[in-house]
Image: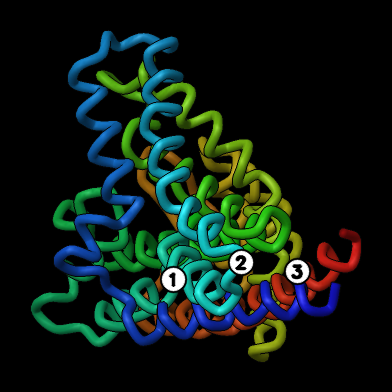
Amino acid sequence: MALAMMYECIALLIALALDWVYPRHEGIAYTMHPVHVTYSISQSLFRLMPRSKLMGVANWFLSVVPVAMAYIAPIALLRHFWIAALIASAVILKTTFSLRLLLDTAKAYSRGGGSMRCHAQQLVRRNVNELDDAHVNSAVIESLAESLVDGFSSPLLYFAIFWVPGAMIQRLANTMDSSLGYMDEPYREAGWFSARVDTVINYLPARITAIIILAAAAVSGRRPSLKAFLNYRRATPSVNAGYPMSAMAASLGIRLEKRGSYELGDGRLPDMGDVRAAIRVTEVAAVMIVITVLGLTALVSAMR
């Protein structure tokens, strides 16, 4: 039991180190990245298949299952060679999350300059050129909070419970939501299943991460408003996104706003100082997430 727990924790720590050393996948590493492969397959199938809910379900399984199996297979094949299996596990786990790239992009935006909106556009879906500065700041902070769930805490929490396959399925499910899970046409029918799966998978991680964001803000010397968090956590169309975003708004004492869609928090719209504060809270929250995942990994190993 102790050996299994140590094995899993070491794999996680190596994966975190790899993410810090090599945050951006380029060249062949990008072409073979499971997120890129899954996205490409799903888009190709979307263009070929009839746009119905049934075909959306088929698209999900045809895009996710082969890629997940291909990436998990090396770990199974190397199971009798524990050092090689450990390295393979860490390398594959690294592809399921991204922290440094998220932080680096947000920090590049916070430094200002002529390319700052280009950095913002890398973080958000909405067209930042149509927004004023305050709403770009809001979009960046929202993306920091939401991406902390989708691209970091959620895959690591699933790793703690279901090992590398859990992290991989979570990441690819999130990729399918990004590829097809839109409420407007032409994705409404075909993306229905992808959106629902992503909602279910990230339901608990979104809420756990919101609590961690509030705790991270308190540790950072801030006074998060629990009242604001409770009032606005369900104010977004997404069942999950409102939790981490309202936690960040409550932590900074600001209002996050997507025009025509939602408002989170009772304060003013954020300035660049709030963006920098959000980055600091995200960094502290990330450390707390790692500690939580290591503890959960130990607990799950003990239960096994």
> Which residue does the numbered mark 3 point to in the structure image?
297
Which label belongs to residue 66?
A: none
Q: How many tags in the picture?
A: 3
Q: Position of residue 80 (x, y in %)?
A: 61, 66
Q: Residue at x 52, y 65 (%)?
A: 152
Which of these two is toward me, 98 or 93? 93
Q: Which residue in the structure is indicated by mark 1? A: 91
- Mark 3 vs mark 2, foreground winner is 2
Q: Nearer the viewer, residue 77 or 2?
A: 77
* C-alpha distance separating marks 1 and 2: 18 Å
Q: Is residue 69 above or below residue 55?
A: below
Query: Which percent across, then down, holds residue 97?
Result: 46, 64
Instruction: Indicate the amino acid at tag 1.
Output: Val
121 to the left or right of 95? left
Q: Does residue 67 appear to the left or right of 293 in the view shown?
A: left
> Where is residue 95 shown, x and y percent of the image?
41, 63
Up-down relation of residue 202 to residue 246 (above or below): above
Residue furthest toward the left?
114
Q: Which residue is depicted at the point 70% across and 49% down?
A: 204
Q: What residue did someone put label 2 on? A: 80
Q: Amino acid at mark 2?
A: His
- At numbered mark 2, what does the secondary structure look like: helix, strand or loop? loop
Element type at mark 1: helix
For the residues labelled 3 and 2, the Cα–Cα distance comes to 22 Å
Q: Quadrant of residue 179?
A: top left
Circle 3 sits in a helix, a strand or a loop, which is it? Answer: helix
